[in-house]
Image: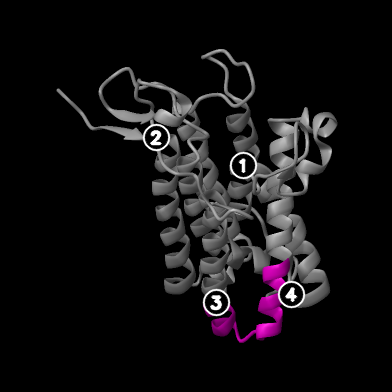
């Protein structure tokens, strides 16, 4: 039976002459803007000030972007450290000629670690509650942001899936291909929509936000479980692997899932919410 096949050959950026507006970068901008408004609703419900929200936005943007970039370099592209060091931190390519590239090559594992660190610093310097209090709330907009990041990956024809071996799938024309692959990016984006709504429901419709660490743990379990299973249809990134061995993304996902289960069912806070 003939199944859906789509040829994918999008425009990745708009050339303004002096500047290239990359759609991938736009997806990140949309993610942060939506995240800001969702967090604003949460902060209003919690009776917090706009000043605290503004500080959160700065800490989260810097932390997540830096962590995502370092995570990609460390886990997937370590050669940049010696070949084009400054491109790690700046949206430019220097090796082989100066070029504006936008922030390309961002790893979700690095972003997750950096988010925890940046929220610790933010809480210590600004909020003065508990780290888990802010993590339980910030994961809601983060889950929605992950949807747009994966859409950006799809636009860039990166983090692609394996060949489907059938008429179903997406043909990534910009990669010079003719056979359909699994749209792994869209699989993840679709699943992350449900992760967002589940977290949103538990925060607004239940009292689970009063259980420190539960929403943060639920986020870790849901998001990294999705990531773990989508990896089975995803092409390896800059690494060699055998079919019977878990890939880097899966091995890195397992600790996050275990930590999430711990915070959901085992963790007992030493301090009460203020």
In terms of image quadrants, where is residue 117? bottom right
On the rendered image, what quadrant is the C terminus found in?
A: bottom right
In the displayed orientation, state which residue is furthest to the left: 1
Mark 4 or 3, nearer chain start:
3
In depth, the one of 235 and 124 nearer the eye is 235
Spatial CA distance of label 1 from label 3 is 27 Å
In the picture, the disc for residue 183 is: 2
Q: Are marks 2 and 4 in contact (CB under 8 Å)?
A: no
In terms of image quadrants, where is residue 127? bottom right
Mark 1 or 3, nearer chain start:
3
In the picture, the disc for residue 258 is: 1
Which range of residues does the magenta coloring cover? 41-58
Residue ID for mark 4: 129
The residue sitting at 82% across, 33% down in the picture is 81
The residue sitting at 55% across, 76% down in the picture is 42
Q: Is residue 46 magenta?
A: yes
Spatial CA distance of label 2 from label 4 is 41 Å
The x and y percentages for residue 255 are 65, 38
């Amino acid at each position: 039976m003939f199944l859906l096949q789509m040829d994918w050959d999008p425009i990745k950026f708009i050339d303004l002459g002096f500047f290239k507006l990359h759609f991938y970068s736009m997806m990140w901008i949309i993610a942060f803007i939506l995240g800001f408004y969702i967090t604003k609703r949460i902060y209003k419900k919690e009776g917090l000030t706009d000043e605290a929200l503004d500080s959160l936005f700065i800490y989260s943007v810097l932390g997540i972007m830096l962590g995502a970039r370092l995570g990609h370099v460390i886990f997937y592209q370590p050669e940049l450290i010696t070949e084009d060091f400054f491109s790690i931190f700046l949206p430019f390519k220097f090796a082989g000629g100066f070029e504006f590239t936008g922030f390309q090559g961002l790893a979700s594992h690095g972003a997750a670690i950096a988010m925890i660190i940046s929220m610790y610093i933010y809480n210590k310097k600004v909020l003065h509650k508990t780290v888990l209090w802010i993590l339980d709330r910030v994961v809601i907009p983060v889950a929605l942001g992950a949807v747009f990041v994966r859409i950006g990956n799809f636009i860039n024809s990166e983090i692609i899936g394996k060949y489907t071996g059938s008429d179903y799938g997406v043909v990534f024309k910009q990669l010079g291909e003719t056979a359909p692959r699994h749209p792994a990016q869209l699989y993840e984006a679709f699943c992350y929509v449900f992760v967002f709504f589940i977290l949103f429901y538990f925060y607004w419709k239940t009292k689970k936000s009063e259980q420190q660490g539960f929403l943060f743990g639920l986020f870790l379990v849901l998001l990294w479980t999705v990531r773990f299973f989508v990896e089975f249809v995803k092409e390896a990134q800059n690494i060699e692997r055998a079919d019977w061995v878990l890939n880097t993304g899966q091995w890195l996902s397992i600790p996050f899932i275990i930590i999430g289960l711990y915070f959901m069912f085992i963790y007992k806070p030493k301090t009460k919410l203020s």
